[in-house]
Amino acid sequence: MSEYSVIGKPTTNVDGAAKVTGEAVYTFDMTLPNMLYGRLLRSPHPHARIISIDTSEAEKLPGVKAVITGKDTPGGKYGLWRRFRELTDQEVLATTKVRFIGDPVAAVAAISEEISEKALDLINVEYEPLPAVFEPMEAIKDDAPVIHEDFPNNINNTRHIEWGNVDDAFKKADYVREDRFNLLSQHPAPMEVHSSVASYDKGSGRLTVWSSTQSPYFLQLGLADALKMREGNIRVIKPHVGGGFGNKNSTMPDSVNAAVLSMKTGRPVKIVFNREEEFTTTEHRTAMHLAIKIGLKKDGTIMAKEAKIITDGGAYTGLGATTLYLAGTYLTFPYKTPNYRYDGVRTYTNKMWASSVRSFGATPAVYASETQMDRAAHDLGIDPIEIRRKNAMTSGYEAPGQYKLESCGLLQCIDKVEERVKEKWTDLSKDEGVGITAFAYMCGGIFNWIDTPYAFSGAMVKINVDGTVDLFTQAADIGQGTNTVSVMICAEELGIGIEDIRLHPADTATTLTDLGAWASRETMMNGNAVKAAAGEAKKILIEVARIKLGENIVYDLEVKDKRIYLALRPERGFSYYDIVKDAIKRNDGEPIIGIGHYTPHGKGMVSPAFAFGSMGVRVKVDRETGQVEVKDIITAHDCGQIINPLGARGQVEGSIQLGLGWGLCEDLPTDNGMILNPSFVDYKLFRTRDMPQIELYDVPTYDPEGPYGAKESAEGTVAPTSPAVANAIYNAVGVEFDGNVLKPEKVLKALKEKEAQ
Amino acid sequence: MANTNYRCPCCRKISSNHHDLARHFLGQTDKKHKDWLKTQRLSYAQLITWQVTEFGNKGYDTLAEVLEKEAPKVE
Amino acid sequence: MKKELKFVVNGESHDLWIEPKTLLVQVLRDELGLKGTKRACDSGACCSCAVILDGKVVKSCSMLALQANGKEVLTIEGLANGANLHPIQQAFIDNWAFQCGFCTSGQIMAAKALLDENANPTREEIQMAMDGHLCRCTGYNMITEAIQDAAKRLQEQKLQEAAQ
């Protein structure tokens, strides 16, 4: 295979100049002529019936142009799990009752945000507070308050995964242990809050919505369902997005209310959440009670695993049902598990709902299974690296009925981490320790709960007569670098330069459907669509070149460095520019158009491919304060063929920041359904001085499913980080934990308890 | 020779295995399935709680025993 | 009652009448249309709104606009020289020191203020100066490297200018 011209080379961000000059426009920045500003009135109760809403005083306030309540909306319900209509449980505004503190009941549009905010105070809502429930185990009980009428026992979703015979296998195992964990939430806290601008065209009855979204298509569908409109009459445009990390997949009250208000006033309406709303009324990571049992031979070989999970779903579904499935799936990674059984339940509770957050399902699951793995290794007297090596998945491994692996570089990743850890961390001082973990992550899901008839990703390439290319993709760049990857793949396939391509991204009116940025799907799925589209255009170029060369059909032609030439006789060929001109002339003046799409087929129940890796973390524990300092990290990652090494490194390091935060300091305590620390002052994130240096090694493999063999790098390293820290703490000072947010007081308490023993 | 099959008492789901039928049953979130359990003096909440908090299959096993008696045969 | 605000922003003089409670970030973004400076929190805890006021980096969300009366403000829009990017901006691009870009303006302005005062900061000094800036995307290390790279570029630029 010839060396790539573009793929695999460090490439700067195609949006770079816009982002470093302040020219990049985010929805948060947008203004349109004659625009109004909307604000939402939210329930102060976690659970209450709405008796009456009087908006008359608010309507009279000068500057107010519209006030709406649930009865003023088209009444459609919406949600992501559209294939199961009972789970599309969100309303634009609550009509009969509210289900969490912050559930919106009214919306105002006025000439300024300040006036809208004042108007909220003038809306009188009479509530009948109802008993509320905040803990999943309580919510399941027969006498618990019912949150959604069609869901007795507040069970939103159940899941069962099974293969082999666990009961038999446990009987035969030499060593069996059970561990229970309580895994807490985390707020994704993107720097750009939820923002939407909606503009209703009175003439055509069509709606345009700009939004800080991870999926223009999902938003288009959500709006269509909520507003009972044909989706084709709704155009969603994604400007630059200031981060999502999972909480901008769902259609949220900013967009749907901006839309209804725009339809009512005939003017554009903008709704932006403040940071407190972002913390308290947008989706966060799913908290869960998790129990796992593992059975091993005395040499450390896994024989069976059984898992039980109850997730705290909150008031609505979002993508929480998928989290339930993925948690049960990730518990089986990255080790060969011949017998497995999983039962999971997601319950409704009267809190803001939990959904997807970067590495969803994996973060809590991998914490549990990787700390358990270490405990088992200690009990059996086996080295923690060795036990992982022994059980590591390899290429060709299949979990019956669930997934099958093509490429898998896990063993090489473990080898690399072990090599570097042994070389580098030879000087551990007192109260310092090392923890090792291994992990895997999906490259997009095969799921179609969104119920689309379209391919999962589509792209279009148009080659103009001067050789410039217009590339149309709906993929959502939310910071991860998808725009750059799209352009790189197109450039490689057509044998041209990045500078020749203009990207037209993320507009549902002008691009083919892409399902959006979640579960690390963009490089795999959008990448494949772009490669296919460019490939179709390339076929036309090759055909024209072949005719002009007049050579025997068996000779291959290549496209590279702006030439199209005979592979075996490279001096015989033509310039890309000449062929483009010729092709257009020969086709009655039509520009060269290539359309491509990708949908995974026959790839099991989870994902078309998986990335793998291993991580070592070095910590120092301060016995006086309980503070854990993360001193150094070494990680090796099999992402298949890395498309952009700069982007891949950025993704790994950002993932680690999130993982460290979940593990050590990002606490979201609630009291009777109220989040107690909804600001960056009180919600602690890792900052510059907290971050250790990270040594990152690429273990290249080739996955036949990915574009140029590429897999994911966007989320994999979130999950293994915290268990590596926990394992390192154990290695340092001998204490264990049953969950995350290992704040100093928690560590100190564990140290004191150990001393007392 | 054909296997004997059994139908879920509340919907059209058919299985040759009571255990599988129990798993299907507890996966349903609608009222009809929940109400049937009450007629059998079973608590949905208790069955699910057993199944998702205790290792083993207590929830399914308990329901499977009842379904063995109550699920209509299908030829 | 509105009060007069006379100040210079990115080299241009402005004479505005504003409500006294208006924050500097509001004047920059909403009155002057300079949207490059962002707001990401309401508690002065993230530094996305950082601009340079009379040579010092400040959080524009945490001061009243009137406090800038008679002073000079430099925002992200004032950094490039026409169509030529500032070496700090180029260093951020070349080192992949941003992803979503929402915190980037604040990061770059703080980096400029730091390098104006300390042309050759150590890694620790950079981290100290930048610790107030929240970033959810990058994990920070690539930003630190970009600032180290920017310091080198600025020193090279100085040497070239001195040689001419």
Image (cartoon, coloured by chain):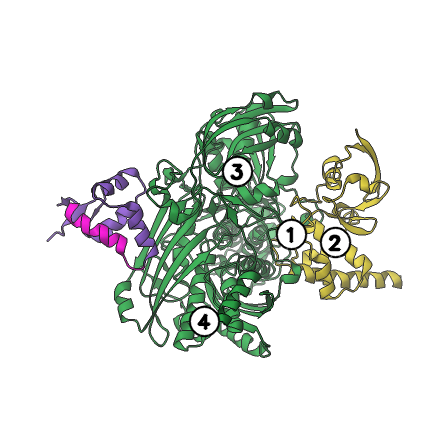
Chain colours: A green, B purple, C yellow
Q: Provide the major secondary structure of the magenta segment.
A: helix
Secondary-structure class at tag 4: helix
Q: Is disc 4 in the same subunit as disc 2?
A: no
- Image marks 4 and 3: residues in contact by CB distance under 8 Å: no
- The amino acid beneath tag 3 is Gly
Quadrant assignment for the C terminus of chain C: bottom right
Q: Which residue position is annotated with label 1?
A: A499
Q: Residue A411 carries which label?
A: 4
Please say if B53 is above or below A270.
below
Residue type at mark 2? Ala
Q: Mark 2 lies on which chain?
A: C
Q: Is mark 3 on a helix, strand or loop?
A: loop
> Earlier along the polypeptide chain: callout 4 or callout 3?
3
Left or right: where A510 falls relative to A738: right
Q: Nearer the viewer, mark 4 or mark 2?
A: 2
> Tag 1's secondary structure?
helix
Few, some or many C-alpha atoms within 10 Å of disc 1 (few <14, some 14-19, many ≥20)?
Answer: few
Q: Do the residues labelled 1 and 4 touch (CB within 8 Å)?
A: no
Q: Real-space Cα distance between discs 2 and 1?
A: 31 Å
Frontmost of labels 2 and 1 is 2
Mark 1: amino acid: Glu
Q: Is residue B7 visible?
A: yes
Disc assigned to residue C110 = 2
Q: How far apart are marks 1 and 3 (CA)?
A: 47 Å
Provide the residue span drawn in magenta: B55-70
Query: Which chain does the numbered disc 1 sit on?
Result: A
- 1 and 4 marks on the same chain: yes
Residue A466 position, x and y percent, is: 63, 46
Are the residues flagged by discs 1 and 3 from a single subunit?
yes
Q: Which secondary structure, mark 2?
A: helix
Query: Which one is nearer the viewer's eye here, A312 or A236?
Result: A312
Task: Find the distance from the CA under tag 4 to the CA under tag 3.
Answer: 47 Å
